[in-house]
Image (tube, grey):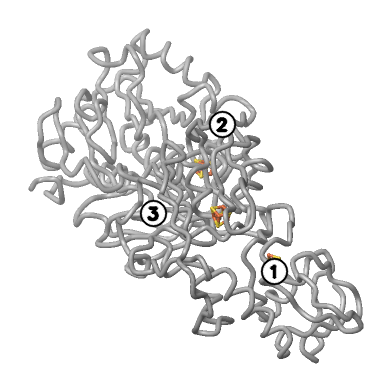
Amino acid sequence: MVKIKIDGVEFEVDEKKNLIDAAKDVGVEIPYFCYHPALSIVGMCRMCLIEIEGVPRLQAACNTPVKEGMGIITKSDRVKEARAGTMEFLLANHPLDCPVCDKAGECKLQDNAFGSGQGHSRFEFHKRNVPQEEIGTNLIINHNRCIVCYRCVRFEEEKVGESNLGLFERGNHSLIGLANNEPIQHNYQGALADICPVGALLNNKTLFKSRVWWYKSHSSVCHGCSTGCNVTTNVRDNKMYRYMVKENYEKGMFFLCDKGRFDLDWMNENRLMTYMENGSPSASTEVIPKIVSSLRGAKGIAVLGGAHESNENISKIKDSISSLGQELGGKTFLFESRVTDAQYKETEQVDFLLTKDQHPNTKGAVDAGATTSEGISGLLSQIQSGKIDLVFVLKEEIPEGLLGKVTVVQLDTNITLSAKNANFAVPIQIFAEQEGSFTNKNGLKQNFEKSMSAPKGLLSSAEFFERLVTSIRTKEEAVLGNR
Ligand code: SF4
Ligand code: SF4
Ligand code: FES
């Protein structure tokens, strides 16, 4: 840490940061557009100009590292005039689109116009008007709103490793466009729209879906793979509308991939809301006693899956199956959370964020001991040989060869093929309807908040196993699923 003076007040700041981040840490906002903490610095927008004591000309704060004893001024008339000039310049061609722009409410141009703009323009000419274009499989560019900050180009080059976008023409004609006329196909089209500080880059999938101020937001963790990116969930009318990145400086998390960001429909649609028996809707009062009877008669029992569940659920399920084993006179339950090849290997990256293991909590499940020495292949052999004849499948596809051979109880959040094909299907809550934690590929345990309310009466996977324990001890009562 070093001491610097900001507007005459002395602060201790991190010497590894630039002036924008160091000032932000102590509560002083320096406005900016082109700066992004995870991208190279280009100093293109000139929004972050400040005075440095002893330096005659204004300097870009994004491009100035912190130095012991330096003094900076962020609120002088010179600084205010420079910021107002930059805003007037950027707004010269910018349309008055806020009422129809998806970025409104979280747009840096709005914020900086409000904080540093003048409220009027001297620009008397026609504004430039370039038609909107589709530039990706899920990406649109509205050229008129672009402020040429170059964030999108840098992000693609520096993080994705592709150079689809480039800056063409000069001055008033400057245009962000496709270098090769091929639509962008990569897994980071959502991130491009996210890092665009204005509403120039937009995703088809979220276009005109909602105004941002209608969302209720919660801190969460992406469910899509073992990286466990930090997200802010945006929920409206108890539906999951958006995942937005929750920037985490300490952990270096600044982006989301499209696979995780846009895989949300399953939380809102096609949910499994009732118990099922052989593909037909049933009720808990019918199904639970039959599962209990199967448990009593089973030679061997296995639970497959669980790496989509929170650490807290996994530990409760382990406790419940141990109690069930005791209640059933010492029967052993084998609990194997690793059901895909990727869960057995060291983390394999698909790209700079996404991993091959598409479970958010394999590491947590393995650490909790939800594993067997024989692994999934050993368990499947035991099933084939008849040693195991009752299998609980926890939000996974039923492995090949099980149906018709053993009794399958599928716990699922959605009406999947597995739920329809299983002997019994049990509806469970999704992770966003609970609070808990996932442990990512690096062993980082990250908490998530409850973002949505679960349908009334719907149990979590852990509560279902607790329910089995109670049912085996007492007479079954109707609780849910009997609508
Ligand atoms: S499209 Fe957005 S991110 Fe790209 S240069 Fe324009 S304003 Fe910046
Ligand atoms: S990399 Fe994994 S955790 Fe991150 S957004 Fe993509 S799917 Fe989600
Ligand atoms: S943020 Fe410093 S010049 Fe753009």
* Image point (80%, 70%), residue name: 14
Q: CA distance from mark 2 to mark 1?
A: 30 Å
Mark 1 residue's CB less than 8 Å from ligand 3: yes
- What amino acid does circle 3 point to? Arg
**Residue 225, x across and y down, in percent:** 51, 38
- Secondary element under disc 1, as helix, strand or loop, is loop
Which residue in the structure is indicated by mark 3? Answer: 242
- Residue occupying image coordinates x 32% and y 25%: 391
Q: Which mark is residue 180?
A: 2
Spatial separation of the CA atoms under disc 2 and disc 3: 30 Å
Which residue is more in the foreground, 346 or 35? 35
Picture residue at 48% right of the left edge, 53% below the top: 143
Give the image quarter of residue 471. top left
- Of circles 3 and 1, the one toward us is 1
Report ligand 1 position as a quadrant.
bottom right
- Please tell me how crowded label 2 is: few (under 14), some (14-19), or many (20+) other residues with Cα within 10 Å: few
Determine whether label 2 and label 3 are within 8 Å by CB.
Answer: no
Which element is circle 2 on? loop
Cα–Cα gap, marks 3 and 1: 32 Å
In this rendering, position of residue 150 left or right of residue 291: right
Residue 276: percent from left, percent from top: 15, 34
Compared with 289, 220 (above or below) is below
Q: Which residue carries the number 1 mark? A: 46
